[in-house]
Image: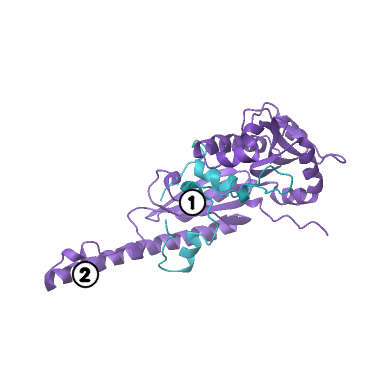
Amino acid sequence: MTDPNLVYTYAVLRRTPEATAAVTHLRGVAGEPIHLVDPAEGTPQLAFAVGHVPAADYDETPLKAHLDDLDWLESTVRPHHAVVAALVGCGAAVLPLRLATVYHDEDRARQALDTRRDYFLSLLHRLTGHVELGVKIYATPDITPPEADTGAGQEQSTGLGAGRAYLSIRRRRQRRNEEAWRRVAQAAAHLIETAATLAVDRVAHSPQRGSLAGPGPGTNVGNDAYLVPAGRVDAFRTGILAAAEGVPGLRVEVTGPWAPYSFALQPEPEPAA
Amino acid sequence: MTVAPYADRPVALIDLLDRLLQGGVVLTGDLILSIADVDLVRIDLRAVIAPVAASALSQISEAPCPRPPAV
């Protein structure tokens, strides 16, 4: 590579005045200005929102190394998302691209717009006018899955009386826990049914675990994304809130609205032979 | 139950990673690198990008006393 810059693509847009206006003043993952790239052929219906980024960071080898660096990832993910969110916020119809979709030059990006025009248009057609909302369901810490309720301290009970008393206490505790878990499970199922009536589609992400999962109490048992018509966002939130209301042991977080990241995954059709 | 407000909260990194590493249009050909091919080493990242199998929630809705997914 002699060119020190590569082309980082953020999103596919309909080529509208809103889209043109939206990219001005935007800055990308490397602090670079964002601009639109049109397809090579014909009247532009679509465009990529792109920025030029240093090859020293975004060529294959450095990029691979960076992707294992959580701090670098965060410093890239946040501005990437900010660009997409700003485009959506300006009223542009947006297909968000996966992180680190990088071309060697703008000509290759243009060719991708040409060859995938119908694919992009069909995805945009399906997603325009919709947003993504996240619903994260937590079981609070006082409720444990029944299988986890093992008899800690069992070895300390001695004698028949102590053993019986211990077992009786343990059974009572188990029953209480099982009932609480069942209530949470029923409420979670009800929540999903409610969401299904208000949303167009649903994608289940992996439950969030580990140090990145945040300091909130409880176990994340549901981490779903819903595709919701833009006009129904408030109804969705209200519906979820009502379905979760009054259920002890249940905590719900609604995130978004997001650009429809989780629903931009319709497989690309095989090229005709 | 509590429902957290969303407008005034900073976006959580893990929610971003769920979407930007697992979602978004995946393009092929002529790219520098496809992120789908990258083996992300960090344990946190592996947790985030674990394949989307049946969610814990679908297990809950199908079985009365399910075991949550292994941590």
Rendered hue of chain A is purple
Indicate the chain on which mark 1 is placed. B
Quadrant into which the C terminus of chain B falls: bottom left
Q: Position of residue A108 (x, y in %)?
A: 78, 40
Residue A78 appears in which quarter of the rendering? Answer: top right
Which label sits on residue A73?
A: none
Label 2 and label 1 in one chain: no
Which label sits on residue A167?
A: 2
Pair 2/1: label in front:
1
Q: Position of residue A152 (x, y in %)?
A: 24, 62
Residue A214 appears in which quarter of the rendering? Answer: top left
Residue to which mark 1 is pinned: B47
Q: Position of residue A267 (x, y in %)?
A: 70, 56
Is residue A179 visible in this depiction of the protein?
A: no
In the rendered structure, the answer to whether residue A65 lies left or right of residue A161 reads right
Residue drawn at 46 percent across, 48 percent down: B43
* Dot 2 amino acid type: Leu
- Nearer-the-camera pick, A244 or A114: A114
Vertical placement of residue A52 versus A239, above or below: above
Vertical placement of residue B34 versus A176, above or below: above
Estimate how packed mark 2 is, as few (under 14), some (14 to 19) or many (20 or more) residues with alpha carbons within 10 Å.
Answer: some
- Nearer-the-camera pick, A24 or A158: A158
Residue A100 appears in which quarter of the rendering? Answer: top right
Residue drawn at 26 percent across, 64 percent down: A173
Rendered hue of chain B is cyan
* Dot 1 amino acid type: Ala
Q: Residue furthest bottom?
A: A160
